[in-house]
Image: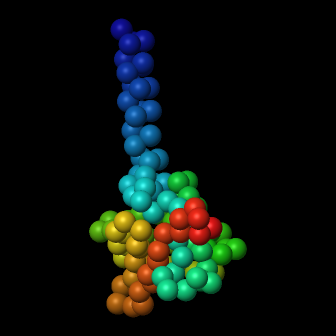
Amino acid sequence: MRRIFLQYNFALRAIVTTVLLCAITGCGNPKIIGKWRMSGDSNATVWEFSKNGLVLIGDVRGRYRFGDQDRIKIETPFATTVYQLKISRDRMILQEPGGSKLEFTRISEAQR
């Protein structure tokens, strides 16, 4: 009987751990994964979001994670910023609370 309890206890812990890891690493918004360039400027810095919570802004590496109410926190060695996130098809808007707005367009394979 004790062995059966331990098996179910292990399975329950594995499921809870998986769900928590998925929430922490940003599985909540897979639409952001990929390369984005500021709209209207073909020479603008490319922002690349990876599945594992890493972001590459030009040559600067950082981390991102999602918060509540469609917020995203981006941390680099130079700054930590929280943005309001809006994604619609191939358009993304990052807006600082009460501040500036950054508009991006997803980069297709042909443009890379």
Instruction: Give the image location of residue 67, x and y in percent.
Output: 38, 65
- Res 62 visible: no
Q: Residue at x 62, y 84 (%)?
A: 43
Indicate left or right for 111 with 39 as reference: right
Between 44 and 93, the residue placed more toward the observer is 44
Q: Residue at x 60, y 74 (%)?
A: 46
- Res 60 visible: yes
Q: Residue furthest right?
A: 59
Q: Residue at x 41, y 73 (%)?
A: 92
Q: Residue at x 57, y 72 (%)?
A: 47
Instruction: Give the image location of residue 30, x and y in percent.
Output: 43, 56
Instruction: Give the image location of residue 57, x and y in percent.
Output: 61, 74
Quadrant (top left/top right/bottom left/bottom right) for the N terminus: top left
Between 96 and 110, the residue placed more toward the observer is 110
Indicate left or right for 87 with 35 as reference: left
Instruction: Give the image location of residue 75, x and y in percent.
Output: 55, 72
Q: Residue furthest front?
A: 110
